[in-house]
Image (cartoon, rainbow, N blue to C red):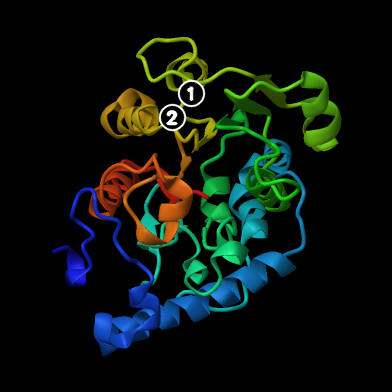
Amino acid sequence: MGPLGLNWTIAGRSAHTCHIFVAENITNKDVFGEINSYSTSLDKHTDAVQKFEPINDLLKAIQKEEDKQDKICQRARLDPSKESFFPNEQLSYSSKQGYMEPLLPTMRHHKICVDIKKYMTNIDYIVHDFETMCKNLKPYSKRVFIDMGASLDFHEDDQPVVRLLSLYEKFGFVFDHIYAFEINPYDANDVYKKLLPEKYMGSYHWINVGVSDKKEDRLNPLYSILKTFEEDDFVVVKLDIDSPTIERNLANTLRENDDISRLVDQFYFEHHVFQREMHPYWLGTMRGTIEESFKLFHDLRKKGIAAHYWV
């Protein structure tokens, strides 16, 4: 049996994960209390993010006044006058990337346990430390977003990746390059005239082919694109192509290849393991266990990558 007897370690069996959020007897009083406390903290954080007034491009401000970078980066702090939204070490921490959400077995917003249709693509569970990200910038840094699985109409009019890009922009991060790989064929006119928000026209590179997991393949962006950037650049990678073997190989490349992992700051990955709540949606693409997924994301975070579950 896995942790707490919930079958999180048994290969091929879809493990329940919502139990720990809704029933005290599944864990114990203390653990259940901590889980509920975190849920309350996350709600406060979500509210603060939504109310945050958008700020101007932080990199441009740093380029103008490099000696004031720390003060400039404080603009990305949610509320400088209040204590942390997450007391008692509720968050994970990386000396390189700062604070991030803990790894939870729902592998997305825990409120799917209440209403899965409403919260399945909600990304408010992801915690970003934009102030620390800002402090890592250099005046010459490039800001890069690599999107593997870049369909802009999969979720109809509500696209999680567009919400993510808008969130970065709200906190002063405007991407210089967005490389979008998508295997399903699209009419470029539809992409650029109908699906893509106009504000991204100057930075968007639409690459309408699937990605490869082969080393040195030009269609493997972890090699062909990343090698054109430096460690001082700010690089975000999103991986969600619903092809288990290729996805896992790419994720393991990040875990095992230090020359590549050192270039990546933020990583978003929808990891299709055997998980009961997502079973109807991931049918046919599930591989591995929740425990194995935790190990992967933990290893990536130890390498200095802020690894987040994606939707």
Asked whether residue 85 is in view, the answer is no
User: Which residue occupies the foreground of this view, 52 or 68?
Assistant: 52
Badge 1 amino acid = Glu
Describe the element under mark 1 as helix, strand or loop: loop
119 horizontally vs 104: left or right: right
For disc 1, the marked residue is 230
Residue 101 quadrant: bottom left
Would you place residue 136 above or below residue 102 in this image? above
Looking at the rendered image, the disc whose residue lies closer to the viewer, 1 or 2, is 2
Nearer to the camera, 311 or 237: 311
The residue singled out by tag 2 in the image is 263
Q: Is residue 2 above or below residue 194?
A: below
**Type of amino acid at the residue the image marks with label 2:** Leu
Which percent across, then down, holds residue 225?
Answer: 52, 18
Picture coordinates of residue 122, whole percent (x, y): 60, 59
Is residue 193 rendered to the left or right of residue 153? Answer: right
- Disc 1 vs disc 2: Cβ atoms closer than 8 Å? yes
Foreground residue among 201 and 293: 293
Report helix, strand or loop for mark 2.
loop
Q: Residues within 10 Å of mark 2 (few under 14, many from 20)?
A: many
Residue 201 pos. (x, y %): 80, 28
Rendered image: mark on residue 241:
none
- In which image quadrant can residue 31 be found? bottom left
Q: Is residue 238 visible?
A: yes
Q: Position of residue 238 (x, y in %)?
A: 52, 37
Classify 88 as above or below 17: below
Name which residue lies at 56% across and 71% down. 115
Q: Nearer the viewer, residue 228 or 110?
A: 110
Circle 1 Cα neighbour tier, 10 Å, few/some/many (<14 / 14–19 / ≥20): some
Image position of 306 (left or right of 194):
left
